[in-house]
Image (cartoon, coloured by chain):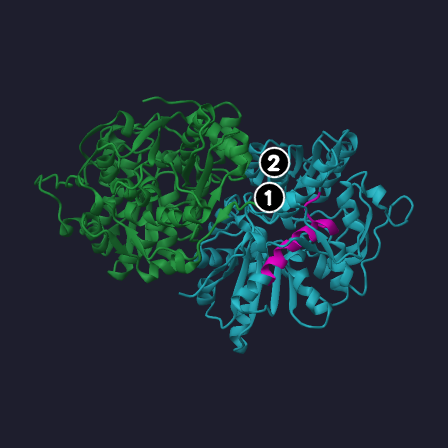
Chain colours: A green, B cyan
Amino acid sequence: MRQKRFFLTESEIPQQWYNIRADMKNKPMAMLNPATRQPVTVEELSALFSEECSRQELNSTDRWIDIPDEVREKYTYYRSTPLVRTYGLEEALDTPAHIYFKNESVSPVGSHKLNSALAQAYYCKREGVTNVTTETGAGQWGAALSYAAKIFGIESAVYQVKISYEQKPYRRSIMQVFGAQVTPSPSMSTRAGKDILTKSPNHQGSLGTAISEAVELAQMTPGCKYTLGSVMNHVTLHQTVIGLEAEKQMEMAGEYPDIIIGCFGGGSNFGGISFPFLRHNLSGDRDTRFIAAEPSSCPKLTKGRFEYDFGDEAGYTPLLPMYTLGHDFRPANIHAGGLRYHGAGVIVSQLLKDGFIEAIDVDQIESFEAGILFAKSEGIIPAPESCHAIAATIKEALRCKEEGIQKTILFNLSGHGLIDMTAYDQFLSGNLVNYRY
Amino acid sequence: MRQKRFFLTESEIPQQWYNIRADMKNKPMAMLNPATRQPVTVEELSALFSEECSRQELNSTDRWIDIPDEVREKYTYYRSTPLVRTYGLEEALDTPAHIYFKNESVSPVGSHKLNSALAQAYYCKREGVTNVTTETGAGQWGAALSYAAKIFGIESAVYQVKISYEQKPYRRSIMQVFGAQVTPSPSMSTRAGKDILTKSPNHQGSLGTAISEAVELAQMTPGCKYTLGSVMNHVTLHQTVIGLEAEKQMEMAGEYPDIIIGCFGGGSNFGGISFPFLRHNLSGDRDTRFIAAEPSSCPKLTKGRFEYDFGDEAGYTPLLPMYTLGHDFRPANIHAGGLRYHGAGVIVSQLLKDGFIEAIDVDQIESFEAGILFAKSEGIIPAPESCHAIAATIKEALRCKEEGIQKTILFNLSGHGLIDMTAYDQFLSGNLVNYRY
């Protein structure tokens, strides 16, 4: 019987995260304090984030960062996640390509987001923090943080982008089951929210806005830290557990990927699966292609500019050197809420600038066509975000067919779409539309 | 690091299902043709079901039934499912008990139902069937059958109990993604549905009614067979893959269960996890306790009568010797749609009568309290059905604590509750009520 799924034993789960900055010749440029235009310091960052995350954020020299035992113990609740060979999809596409995916949808909260949520909640707990705040788009990150906070005994407050709060009510419920306080953003509970609502009473929200609100609440609340689900270096660092596992699992499968694909919002799942493999490109040992798949309606990698910009709408964050559509960009109401963000992580931005990775944009309808084909052939209904990675994978697999070349493609299934069925309903009834930038 | 999850390799996945009837001293009584009051024959059954399933239904002598390679190949998409040690829940309960669960929620469609759907769809395909019909309550079985039919290239039509169709719209969408035609039941598309709606225009539906409609459609459609998600012997046979895997996995964990628990609707997940272990009780080698957890509002095992009754409301099925509340019983609108069935499978009924298993009933509110505690400690939001098994597990674990005895408890997590968040919403807002029989 051909083997479809590859697991690691608990002792094979990585003991360290991989910090790609240590291997980059061109290090990412410094983040700046907007007031002084000087590089931000750990001390400044730790006013907002846990101290350990602040240190990790600015650490560009240590190649390997230990995963605390307490975090690794929680990882074993769901890790290793399976590496899966998609015989069903390959057959449906009639492609010579071998397609694999890393199935992060099996995490308790349904996505890869838990990999960083556990780390961030743990560090907060260790440092005596009692409350955490965050923003969430589709709700994947919010659900992960709510659960992680709960198991480490911390209170959590989540600002959910209003359009997602309304499109995906089940995610709000999931966060509430884990004990989180959930507020649709923009809200009247913060100055940032009030300012935005005063100017635009019907503002549907964006990740940038929700970040402003969560940051403000953290700053106003004693014993409270802010946490972020993507974009930042330390978040992508935690997500490298995906690629490190996948590396061992691809070895079990007896193959090495020619192409690695992830959907792209802020970069955490894309970087998480890519960076451990990319290190072999940086060292000159491999020339794997890395493709970030972003929505056509929010195309910072393919149509944004590389410049210093804020990470949030209100301008509370440091200035980040990144590809951006502008921090006041208003993304269209696509269902892939996790990809509705104006900027790209600093490391990914530098790597794109230096030609180590590629980016393509995918229309909303094409993404759901890909998702449905995947569901019918592999049985898993993918998150709207992950549908973008699948669409890009299908493009490459069909190119293999056209050119008669057998390539090995690995993509990251960042999450399942069981909470996003209204989106599939709209697609099936022909009511889904494309938004272009 | 203590090991939480136990997996089998693909080659260790069972090659045969276990047919407990071969080991029962008191065999279940015969099913009767209601017209002749004579035992039904394979020929009569196969007017409705696939021939192979009809043979399996009446086979009480072969202890082991081969799993076809084609089915086993599809099992490897998600099997083995993990056996999980619940350190989080044990800690929350402060119990000396060791609690394990078999996590069937990781199947592509979110429940154990796929184990039989794949087998039934495969046999239909092999026998030249082009269409299948079925009923579904909460939608777990309907989703499984829709997916199984899709991957074996068969059309599917599903009658979903109306109250579930309305409570759980995402499940309808999932079935539609897999290409199924979904109709709320009772409907005007069958004589059985029309009769019921004429008498009771506001009938909220029940599994018994939906079965009548699906059976009628199968009988009226050339090339079409009917499939069932529980109750029947062949369905429970297919589900024994759960217990057979669990047996090997408990061995990996170095323990043997003292108590095995499953929620109870028609008996498929309960029998699936129990029967392989129960064979060691039947042979006198073990004295494990087996507990079926049913809802207080639909308590056929604890308050029903053992007698011949129809499997459906309209009286289309054979007469089954079973514990029943009467085939015209109208279950209350609890959220555990999969447990809203008037009767119990024939094998389980005989085993209960003979004292080999126990049953308890659980109130709706207690079931959700248990589900929330489980979610907070293990991260997985359980299906409302599975919450009943968890509630029974907690009862036993607390008894261990009270008596200071360390027992090993194994329960079946039949499915996740991500599509059932409206039920959790109602619970969290205090709007959930108990229904008693």
Q: Percent from the top left, x then y, of residue A223?
A: 23, 56
The image shows residue B82, relative to residue A279, as above or below, that is below
Q: In which quarter of the view is residue B2 placed?
A: bottom left
Rounded to the nearest angstrom, the CA distance separating label 2 from label 1 is: 9 Å
Callout 2–callout 1 Cβ contact below 8 Å: yes
Dot 2, crowdedness within 10 Å: few (<14), some or many (≥20)? some
Q: In this view, does A141 lie to the left or right of A354?
A: right
Helix, strand or loop for disc 1: helix
Q: Name the kind of residue labelled 2 in the image.
A: Ile
Tag 2 and tag 1 share a subunit: yes
Residue position marked by numbered label 2 in the rendering: B151
- Picture disc at residue A318: none
Q: In which quarter of the view is residue A284 placed?
A: top left
Q: Is residue A38 left or right of residue B181?
A: left
Q: In this view, does B330 lie to the left or right of B219?
A: left
- Boundaries of the magenta span: B228-247
Residue closer to the observer: B407 or A366: A366
Residue drawn at 20 percent across, 49 percent down: A48
Q: Mark 1 lies on which chain?
A: B
Residue drawn at 69 percent across, 57 percent down: B299
Q: Name the kind of residue labelled 1 in the image.
A: Lys
Name the image quarter holding the N terminus of chain B: bottom left
